[in-house]
């Protein structure tokens, strides 16, 4: 999971699609939570041109990756505030996230709140996951920030969406293992071989999964990796350009 920058609705969607969402929002505001109309309206929406254009807009800022686990080829529109509970938000651009079916199903219509009504779930367009998670670079496990104001959001998000499921944890571990091996080659080679350079660039591409843990590697490096990160960037300055779009 990494932070995302959601474009404004007027920049992301054409005028016709914006008008469609406004119209549907007006209708949805009259509907109570859990009303059967909600499922029928969303089923109808799936076959519209507006749905296709919204899919494209979500893919542009999320690069087709799940907003939660960062898996590629995510296809679901996930309602951060569940449509069944908050029907007035079911057609709100600001409430849409791209998600894989696994994360979307796991989250379902859950939306935990604290006693004062504050949300207990991270929103990657509003929160920086790096402020809440502390990934283990050796195992890929999702650790939690222990600060009292951050732990509840981190814990709920990890456990509710199962962000530490074995398959994802192993992929994060493999990502860091391969990237650090490549960076070690960068440091050792003079000059850096074109193949190694290309592989490093590919691993750091914004379209690749699991950049959340890689952000930690570069922004808050463990002492064991600090010299490697510095020396690799000095040896191959292009690294700074490759990571800039998502760092």
Image (cartoon, rainbow, N blue to C red):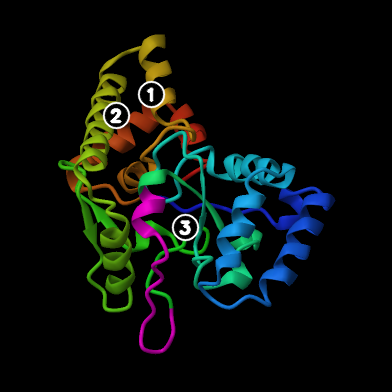
The answer to whether 91 is drawn above or below residue 151 in the figure is above
Expressed as whole percent of the image width and height from the top left, the position of residue 162 reads: 27, 54
- Quick check: is 113 in the magenta stretch? yes
Q: Residue furthest bottom?
A: 116
Residue for point 37% across, 74% down:
112
User: Looking at the image, is mark 2 or mark 3 earlier in the sequence?
Assistant: 3
Quadrant of res 53: top right
Task: Tell me if 118 is positioned left or right of 164 in this view.
Answer: right
Residue 54 within the magenta-colored segment of the rendering: no
Q: Residues within 10 Å of mark 1 (few under 14, many from 20)?
A: many
Residue 15's spot in the image, x, y percent?
84, 52
Discs 2/3, front: 3
Nearer-N-terminus badge (3/1)? 3
Q: Which mark is residue 142?
A: none
Q: Secondary structure at mark 2?
A: helix
Front one among 180 and 22? 22
Residue at x-position 26% and y-position 39%: 172
Q: Point out which mark residue 124 bears.
A: 3
Observer-nearest residue: 238 or 30? 30
Q: Residue at x 56, y 60 (%)?
A: 39
Q: CA distance from mark 1 to mark 2?
A: 7 Å
Bounds of the magenta segment? 103-118
Please give the residue where the numbered disc 1 appears in the rendered image: 200
In the rendered structure, the answer to whether residue 13 lies left or right of residue 177 reads right
For the residues labelled 3 and 1, the Cα–Cα distance comes to 26 Å
Residue beneath label 2, please?
A: 179
């Amino acid at each position: 999971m990494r932070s995302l920058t959601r474009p404004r609705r007027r920049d992301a969607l054409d005028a016709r699609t914006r008008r469609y969402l406004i119209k549907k929002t007006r209708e949805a505001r009259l509907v109570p939570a859990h009303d059967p109309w909600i499922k029928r309206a969303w089923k109808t929406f799936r076959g519209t041109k507006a749905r296709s254009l919204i899919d494209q807009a979500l893919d542009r800022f999320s690069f087709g990756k799940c907003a939660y686990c960062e898996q590629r080829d995510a296809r679901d529109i996930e309602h951060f505030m569940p449509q069944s509970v908050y029907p007035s938000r079911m057609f709100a651009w600001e409430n849409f996230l791209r998600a894989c079916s696994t994360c979307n199903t796991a989250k379902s219509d859950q939306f935990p709140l604290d006693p004062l009504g504050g949300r207990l779930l991270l929103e990657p367009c509003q929160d920086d996951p790096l402020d809440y998670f502390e990934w283990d670079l050796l195992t890929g496990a999702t650790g939690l920030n222990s600060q009292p104001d951050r732990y509840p959001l981190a814990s709920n998000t990890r456990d509710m969406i199962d962000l530490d499921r074995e398959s994802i944890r192993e992929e994060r571990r493999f990502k860091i293992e391969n990237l650090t091996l490549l960076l070690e080659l960068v440091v050792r080679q003079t000059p850096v071989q074109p193949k190694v350079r290309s592989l490093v660039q590919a691993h750091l591409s914004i379209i690749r999964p699991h950049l959340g843990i890689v952000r930690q590697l570069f922004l808050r490096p463990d002492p064991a990796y600090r010299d490697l990160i510095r020396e690799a960037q000095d040896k191959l300055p292009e690294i700074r350009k490759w990571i800039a779009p998502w760092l």
